[in-house]
Amino acid sequence: MSASREHVLNAVRASIRQSGKPTLSPEQLTERLERPRPGLVPQRGQLDLAGRLDLFESWAKALSATLVRLDDLAHVPRAVADYLRQENLPAQVRLAPTPEIEGLDWQSQSLVEIARGRAQIDDTTSVTPAFAGIAETGTLMMLSGPQTPTTLNFVPENHIVVLKASQVVGSYEEALAHLRQVHGQGRMPRTVNYITGPSRTADIEQTIQLGAHGPRRLHILLVKDSADA
Amino acid sequence: MESTAHAFKDNVTTALHDANLQQALGKVRQGFIVKRREAADRLPEFEALRDQARDIKNHTLAHLDFYLEAYEKKVTEQGGQVHWAATAEEARDKIVDICRAADAKVVTKGKSMIAEEIALNAHLEEAGLDVVETDLGEYIIQLRHEPPSHIIAPAVHVTKKQVEADFRQYHADLPPERHLDEPWELVNEARQVLRQRYFQADVGITGANFLVAETGSSIIVTNEGNGDLTQILPKVHIVITSIEKVVPNLDDAMAILRVLARSATGQEFSTYTTLSTGPKRAEDLDGPEAYHVILLDNGRSGMLGGDFADMLRCIRCGACINHCPVYHAVGGHAYGWVYPGPMGSVLTPNLIGVEEAGHLPNASTFCGRCESVCPMRIPLPKMMRHWREREFERHLSPKAVRWGLSLWAFFARRPRLYGWATGMAMSLMAAVGRKNGFFERLPLAGGWTDHRAFPTPQGRTFRAQWAARQRQGEEPS
């Protein structure tokens, strides 16, 4: 297909030349590419921590997720068991194989059956860590990796996400800056998921129905992890 | 897909008399418009974000060759492959080759307008593959053997009752006495049926809303989560996309995403926005082992730098369609090809020729609503006017139109005669129609009076009234 490559690129170049518009030099373009700068960030994406947490919570709930705040990561297993009971769901969860989640005291909830690893077709509920929460639209940011398989975000009917208060940023751009810090400029995990509420469709007569193909329920455990959060 | 754009007039007649379609279109006229307005009003920076989105795309398109090469380099670095395709045929052949090499039997698909553009399903089926559309709307129209009628709501023309009938016919192994009256029952049934298919699939095909040069990522935006299940479960992920989808940085993509969902469905953000970069990493527990991007031109490079270059900014949100009075009346199928509404009226003649699709740019009242809501500020009415001019210059307009225009031009060049003739016509119509206040029939105006009454003119032309008020020194109100 390299003939097609040259064909397409040459056609693009010919059209750009024909337009006669001034163009930037390759050096200027490389500079723009390698030094990303945020553009216009809405006011609502620029709040202090308390403001961010409140805005995140209100959007997440408005967009049909549920959310509870916890004072300590150690309370997660209990909160998960409570949620399963309250929603009348099977007492089984699949945990993301990350020490932060796996390492919690799940023994304390002896009635809940625990599995680990990537999702299987009949899994009912998953528990996964978030990479960030984005306040401006109540959006979760999830990264794929050996300890965070993407299938856990989509296959089970119920998705429980553990989000630490210190991970809640104001805007998409802030979350990207954080991603670049962790993974390096221009490098990415295989999959980055931005998740805003549970799965939905309006394909039947424009009526919104939750639980189209992804999770029917999205439950967020927002955990306090520093003095000011 | 096979175009019927040349038969636009017949398509319209059929659409106007289709009771199911007219019922379904009622929902479009209401929902989308209010929701978009509310979403825009909730974000004070919305108008400034539209300007920014336009500028980002203009910058990218002015340096498209640079950004495409940068994008390709990044995809390759991360272990993916980019396949360039100048034509639809090349794109289809490449996809079939990849499926064959993977020894694929079942192929799942996320919603992709480029796949519709290149008629991918028919081609894959010919190659012996079992193709499964997974977006609920696309699944419904696949069962019905119909093309999509809207770029973000492909089955918007289908009523709930029709979906129920289709599901009863095609899901024959499910108990016939089951309830399927409510939308949630239909959604659940589709969920159950498709769940197995995701896990059977050997290849998953998705489109892309954006390609990011900085990282070599492709981005999809969905609400159902079907696109994600399509691309993470099979061993091969193919992205079918086109050259104008590239943006420089992740920040640019997020900046445009801020106006996409708000313009499309009035959502703050779509439920799922997913960035995919290369195949799964060695230590990952899931994800595809191979990642291919098919980069299609199909006439787009020719639009660059010309009268229609602005159209390449389009992000396929569907706002112009949702706000178009012509679309509201006739639906998407009447347009005869993949892209309906104002964006289709501009794009289709570019992609399949003005000879075939010359009627479409005429399907506009030039009310300007499309341009006023376009998040990328594409001057759609202006470009439809370009097509009309070209159609006229190339003598493609029908005889009646050319004859009518010549007649009008004859009078327009003779203002006194024009004033006299229109004045006569107005007085005559006023005298004849005064009793009823409207005409149920008018010679040469059946296109109007077949569907609604024509109000009786007051008796004086606009120009005569204007002149009279000017003489009285009154400000025309």
Image (cartoon, coloured by chain):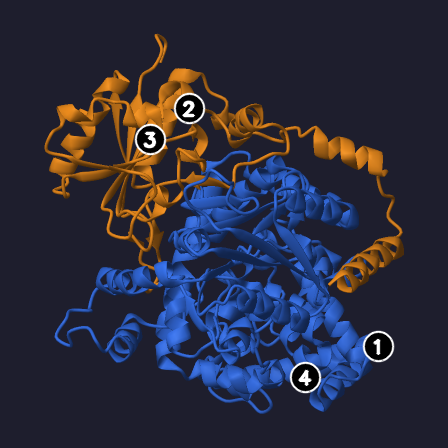
Rendered view: A135 above or below B225: above
Q: Nearer the viewer, residue B222 or B381?
A: B222
Q: Secondary structure at mark 2?
A: strand
CA–CA distance in space, label 2 to label 3: 13 Å
Q: Quadrant of the C terminus of chain A?
A: top left
Of marks 1 and 3, the one in the foreground: 3
Say which chain tag 3 marks.
A
Q: Residue at x 68, y 84 (%)?
A: B424
Say which mark, if any, is on residue B424.
4
Q: Secondary structure at mark 3?
A: helix
Q: Residues within 10 Å of mark 2 (few under 14, many from 20)?
A: many
Check the rendered structure and report the hue given to chain B: blue
**Tags 2 and 1 touching, CB below 8 Å:** no
Same chain letter for marks 1 and 3: no
> What residue does disc 1 label?
B413
* Label 2 sits on residue: A168
